């Protein structure tokens, strides 16, 4: 994080707070309170919130505090559909275009996953996992594709995290990524398609399930408040 701007560092912290549920969907992000909590001025905090808004994690509101976004099930389902197509295309292109250094870098990320799986919290492991997928997209050597992947990965950041922690296990996190790297190193398009398919086969239903549950819980909470 040393080479990041202050707003980017603040955005990282707020993003983690959203993942950990400290900032929940629909909760307002009050400028003064959060600036005081983070020990920063309001200007970089405001810029950080704009970063999160471009990612779809935060919703800006005129003359009111921004809130943590509450995506609809349809919106999430559509975004997952696009992300899955991008991930598969990136993997296939990477088989032909990735450099050996890029393959080695992805293998190193898997080693970190294996070493840290039992010692780091879910948020850090998720960030390591997503760095692998972002690296795979860049290894396709198609900047437009990598940009689109980054956009949709950001939009689904929280949804994907929620689905990941529900199914967190060493086989899925370590073995699946190892199989992807092995297929990439062998330049085997069929093998990487199979490996990535096995890794992502439950992504869409899992994400839709957790978002549906969250919306239902939020609605139930609102109903209880109305009854008081």
Image (spheres, rainbow, N blue to C red):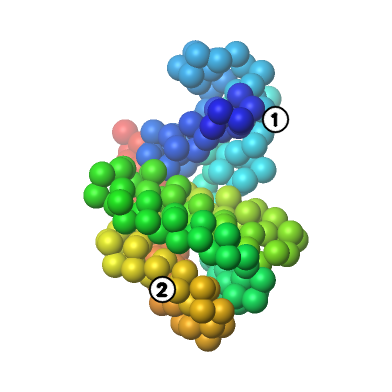
The picture places residue 157, in percent across and down from the top left corner, at: 51, 51
Q: Nearer the viewer, residue 104 or 215?
A: 104
Residue located at (53% from left, 86% from top):
190
The quadrant where residue 170 appears: bottom left
**Residue 58 in sight in this render:** yes
Q: Circle 1 is placed at which residue position?
A: 62
Q: Does residue 216 appear in the picture of this structure?
A: no
* Element assignment for label 2: helix
Task: Kindly identify which numbered label has been placed on residue 115.
Answer: none
Q: Is residue 217 above or below residue 67?
A: below
Cα distance between the residues tagged 1 and 2: 48 Å
Q: Tell me: residue 203, above or below residue 135.
A: below
User: Which residue: 61% across, 46% down?
Assistant: 56
Query: Picture quarter containing residue 93?
Result: bottom right
Residue 179 marker: 2
Residue 51: horizontal and vertical position, in percent? 64, 37
Q: Residue at x 70, y 64 (%)?
A: 141
Helix, strand or loop at label 1? It is loop
- Residue 176 image point, x, y percent: 38, 70
Q: Quadrant of residue 66?
A: top right
Mark nearest the camera among 1 and 2 is: 2
Q: Residue at position x 40%, y 59% from top?
A: 110
Toward the viewer: 211 or 170? 170
Vertical placement of residue 174 versus 221, above or below: below
Residue projecting furthest to the right: 144
Q: Quadrant of the C terminus?
A: top left
The quadrant the N terminus occupies is: top right
The foreground one among 25 and 200 is 200
Mark toward the start of the polypeptide (1 vs 2): 1
What crowding class fits label 2: few (fewer than 14 Cα within 10 Å), some (14-19), or many (20 or more)?
some
């Amino acid at each position: 994080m040393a080479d990041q701007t202050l707003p980017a560092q603040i955005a990282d912290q707020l993003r983690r707070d959203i993942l950990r549920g400290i900032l929940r969907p629909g909760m307002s992000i009050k400028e003064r309170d959060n600036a005081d909590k983070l020990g920063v001025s309001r200007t970089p905090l405001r810029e950080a919130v704009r970063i999160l808004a471009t990612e779809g994690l935060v919703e800006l509101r005129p003359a009111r505090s921004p809130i943590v976004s509450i995506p609809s099930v349809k919106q999430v389902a559509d975004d997952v559909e696009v992300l899955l197509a991008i991930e598969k295309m990136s993997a296939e292109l990477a088989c032909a275009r990735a450099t050996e250094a890029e393959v080695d870098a992805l293998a190193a990320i898997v080693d970190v996953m294996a070493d840290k799986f039992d010692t780091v919290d879910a948020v850090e492991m998720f960030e390591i996992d997503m760095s692998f997928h972002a690296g795979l997209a860049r290894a396709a050597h198609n900047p437009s594709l990598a940009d689109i992947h980054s956009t949709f990965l950001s939009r689904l950041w929280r949804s994907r995290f929620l689905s990941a922690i529900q199914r967190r296990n060493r086989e899925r996190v370590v073995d699946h990524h190892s199989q992807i790297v092995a297929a990439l190193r062998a330049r085997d398009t069929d093998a990487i398609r199979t490996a990535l398919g096995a890794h992502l086969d439950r992504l869409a239903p899992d994400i839709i399930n957790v978002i549906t549950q969250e919306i239902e819980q939020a609605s139930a909470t609102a109903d209880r408040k109305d009854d008081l």
